[in-house]
Amino acid sequence: MRMVNVSIIVPVYNAESVIDRCINSILNQEYKDFELILVDDGSKDDSGKIIDYYAAIDERIVPIHKENGGVSNTRNVALDRARGKYIQFLDADDWMSDNSTKLLVRTMEKNDVDLVIGDFYRVVGKNIAHKGSLGTDEVLALDEFAELMMESPADFYYGVLWNKLYKKEIIDKYHIRMDESLSFCEDFIFNLEYYLHMEKLCALQVPIYYYVKTEGSLVSQAMSISKIIEMKTNVFTYYNNFYKNVLDEKQYRKDRIAIASFFIDTANDSFVMPMGPMTKKLGKENVKAELIVDDRNIEVLGYYLSKLNDKYLNSIAIKHGLDLNSVKLLSAIYISKEYLSLKVLCDYTNLSNASASMCISKLAVKQLVGMHYRNNKVVVGFGSKADSIVEDIRMAYSDVKETLLSDFNEEEKNQLCTLLEKMNKNLVKILN
């Protein structure tokens, strides 16, 4: 059996109209070391045939067909079969960004944590909104995380499976599985059990998943008050037990009222206002190449390189609450490794003096840049709080290089580096 780093699990039931989108979003991941476990839960449509079609063309896909047993049973079957070091879940009617698995794994391994949680996009028709709860990318201890979750315990961010990366070792060691007797909050209970056995975690501030609320699903159905209370009571047993184990007795007594507020907190993924300030049109959240040309010429290469650069820098902009132009301005400082004049920054970013000055002002307020006088001119460099974003820019350029050199052997990589050095000298000679 081929060992893999990540097992991606997708339960499938009567999903023939959406499963292609989900599968393609996984197969097109920048991260390649994964297996995709597609479990057909006795579908009555052509979902099973679609799964087999993809399995025939990509060896990373593990198709499983079983009698209908519900989504919890389906996920458990997949967990028993998974061979990856890490576990990632998707729902069949959703999809993920092409850097999702890469960012989750990178964050897990860089910070040596037991769980990574990412933000997500809530999709309603052609509109999307960025959703997330943890406003920090610092490593959090379990008790710190528990206190933050207490503020909004029924938030989808904490309860769902699909915006997280888990360690298979923890799942197996404590035999954490979905409770097949439940049809409500079984994913949250799975998470509570997992949380109980982790030591630290980290949150991504970048959306990695597109969640589509399906009409007719359990969450969207109207339920009687008595039914809601019954289900809340069942879940609260696990929820309360989690805090009893995580908090010391004194802190638990102090937080009892906040813990009990779980009863009145409703499952929340937040709605999307078509004209809201945080709402975008689907497709506007990413940088993509609109011009698709097969010709092998320098003009097309330059266009694609520019778009690829913007794509990775745009993720940094989302993470830090900046616009793309501001990050491109910071990247100019990073590349030069020195303070730059406004003229140079405008030239690099193609911004006007007014637009560049506005970006600099916003960055200065956040202490991401600092300004000094040199030869009677204002020059701009990194500020006192730029370390985190500098590291992100460094990683972005590393990703650009990795994308460019994917499928290159060592000899080809060396040849390209030599050619690039010659081309750069030629360009500098003619432009300077």
Image (tube, rainbow, N blue to C red):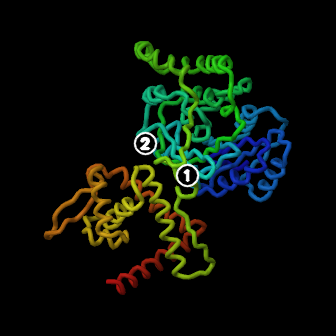
Rendered-image quadrant of the C terminus: bottom left
Please name the residue that numbered disc 2 is placed on: 137
Q: Residue at x 24, y 56 (%)?
A: 370
Residue situated in front as seen by the camera: 93 or 146: 93
**Few, some or many residues within 10 Å of mark 2 (<14, 14–19, 20+):** some
x, y percent for residue 91: 68, 42
Q: Of the residues under marks 2 and 1, which one precedes in the sequence?
A: 1
Give the farthest residue toward the left. 376
Give the farthest residue toward the front. 275
Residue situated in front as seen by the camera: 175 or 262: 262
What amino acid is labelled 1 in the image? Lys
x, y percent for residue 283: 57, 58
Element under disc 1: helix
Is residue 84 placed above or below 25 in the rendered structure?
above
Q: Residue at x 41, y 54 (%)?
A: 392
x, y percent for residue 111: 45, 42
Marks 2 and 1 sit apart, C-alpha to C-alpha, by 16 Å
Residue situated in front as seen by the camera: 64 or 299: 299
Please name the residue that numbered disc 1 is placed on: 102
- Mark nearest the camera among 2 and 1 is 2
x, y percent for residue 320: 40, 50
In the displayed structure, does residue 211 sit left or right of residue 378?
Answer: right
**Few, some or many residues within 10 Å of mark 1 (<14, 14–19, 20+):** some
What amino acid is labelled 2 in the image? Asp
Q: Determine the image quadrant of residue 326.
A: bottom left
Is residue 403 placed above or below 132 in the rendered structure?
below
Is residue 40 placed above or below 379 in the rendered structure?
above
Instruction: Please state the total of marks drawn on the protein image.
Output: 2
